[in-house]
Each structure stands twice: as C-alpha cells, then as structure tokens.
Image (cartoon, helix red, strand yellow):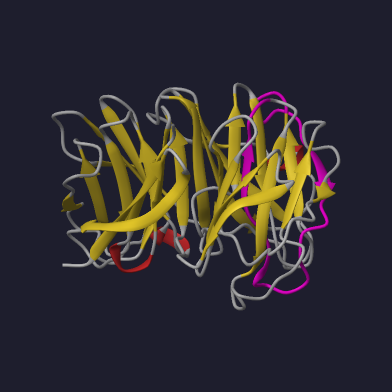
Amino acid sequence: MRLALVFLLTANGFAQWRPQQSPTTESLRGVSIVDRSEIWASGTHGTYLVTKDGGKTWTVNHVTGTDGLDFRGVKAFRNEAFLLAAGPGDKSRIYHRRKGHDWEIQFTNHEPKGFLDCMAFSDPNHGFVVGDPVNGKFQILRTRDGGTTWQYIDPHKLPPALDGEGAFAASNSCIATMGTNIWFATGGPAARVFYSPNAGETWTVADTPITHGTSSQGIFSIVFRDSLHGTVAGGDYQHPDQTGTNLATTDDGGKTWKLVTTQPQKFFSAISYVDDRSIIVAGATSSGIAADDLRAWKWFSADGFHALATSDGVTCAVGANGKIARLNAP
C-alpha cells in the first residue's frame, strides 16, 4: 500500500510529515472536509476515498462504470456528496449521491469542445462549475436546487475569453464562492480573475501579475477569506521547481491584484487559508505556510501535493500516488 501522510503540530511549531497507510495509488486532485472526522478525496479511474475517523483509516471506492473518468473535484456535505469528472466532451460529468442511495449522473457535457474544470458550492443547494471556453466564452454551470437541474449561465453575460485562455482542472480550486459572490481564475495568454457579485448575473474581469504566457502557465487556485481579501496561486506546471511571480493578493474583492514578494515561489496548484492571517500552499514539488498575510514563510517543505481543503479547523492535502496529508490547526 502507498503511504499517505499526516502533518503534525507541536508546541514549538511545525514538526514533520509522518506516514499512515493509504488504500490507493491513484492520483488524487479533489478533497473535501465535512468535519474533523469525515473527509473525502477523489482521483483517477473513477476513484473516491472517505475517512470517518479523521484520517486514521481510509476506504477506497469506485463509482460503477467510471473507470475511464478522472474525478478532479469532490464536495461532500453531511448527507450527500458531489463528484466532478473533468475531461473532453462527455468525459466531463457531475455525479451525486445522497446517504443511503446509489450514485447518479446529474449532468453530462455534450459539447465536444467543452471541458469542465472545477466546482464550488455556497451551500448544498447552490453550486457552480467552471468550464473552458466554447465559442469564445467560458462555460459556467449553475444549480439552485442541489443539482436536480444544472443550467449554463447565459454566455452573453460573460466577458469574452482571450484566444487560448482557459481554466485549470488541477486542484478543483480555480473557483471560489462566498454567498452570491463568485470568482474564477484563468491561465494561458493571461492570468485573469472573473468576478460576479450576484450569482452569475453580471460579470467583470481583472488582470493579475501572475506568471502567464504559455498554455502551462497562469492561476491554478483562488481563495477568499471574506468578500474583499483573497489570494491567487499558480505558476508553470511544466516547470514546478521554477521560481516566479506565482502569488498575488487583493484587498478590494478582486478588482486589483498585488504581487507577493515572499520567496521562494515555486509552482503552486492549491492554496487555502489556515486562519485569517496564515495561508498554506502546495504544488507538485513543494508546500509551505506563510504567516502575516504572506509577508514571510513560517515553514517550507519539499513535500508536494495537488490539492488542499480547510474547514472546521482542519487542513487536508492530497496528491500523486495516493498521498493524503492532514494539518491539525492549534
């Protein structure tokens, strides 16, 4: 079995990565925390994992008939869960299961050029999914009834995408929601943040100084701690150890973005607030925690992960070959 990882805190600060048993070697890119005990993860070949004891033991499961799908996103609530399969055409799907029931397909993408990237929920009834541009506009799915119906937001309401611009399905965190506020981030020829204050009815878009220019560069993750203060992370996934302008912050709800100067800045595919002033980041070859609004690294490590989630005082990370990590906040 592949060793998963648990990150421990001591009274003197951050200790070391310590291994636990993981039941899979699949690549994991989705993670969702219900509470301190129940955590979900998702990955390749129709795989999802669940722990009910805070990560001491994990069970590995598969959705029937999805061996060819890559579950890049998962969102779990107390009595239900959603899985997002990312891929070209009809390999992009949304699955849903209520407690005590089987998985059901809620949505299948039938647009050949479509590719769903990431999903987020404001609550169990209200969810959003970002898809790559089709005919020059990003595809944004919205549900207001827990996924019983998913509908595309009118593309005429969105600013046009640039030629070659897209979103990244790297960590299910290219989108952030807070109430009716929605932000999603892009890469390629530009690294931009699209913003809607009213659940997708109107949109604006802002440039950021994050590394961009090629199809492997841009913003991979976006997170907000309140409606004004947010952070984006990214870089170049083809050169994960290359330093660059890979972190930026906003204090005006995403209208303007300012580079973070803290170094090193390697490729980061995921970012999450640990508390109001501290942020954890992770990429394929590194992870770290920055304190005081990213003014300095409090801890930096060569251990890499694909995705992060923080909730209920718990931060959990997942990565390649079945790696899972947990950070218990003091």
Image coords of residue 312 (percent x, y): 41, 27
Magenta stretch: residue 80 in it?
A: no
Give the magenta-colored segment's residue range: 197-226
Q: Residue at x 59, y 77 (%)?
A: 238
Q: Is residue 236 left or right of residue 323?
A: right
Q: Is residue 249 above or below residue 21?
A: above
Image coords of residue 4 (percent x, y): 27, 59
Q: Is residue 41 visible?
A: yes
Question: Nearest the camera: 329 or 11?
Answer: 11
Q: Residue at x 74, y 46 (%)?
A: 295
Q: Quadrant of residue 205?
A: top right
Quadrant for the N terminus in the image: bottom left
Question: Nearest the camera: 278 or 320?
Answer: 278
Q: Quadrant of residue 65?
A: bottom left
Image coords of residue 154 (percent x, y): 67, 37
Magenta stretch: residue 225 in it?
A: yes
Q: Is residue 304 left or right of residue 288?
A: left
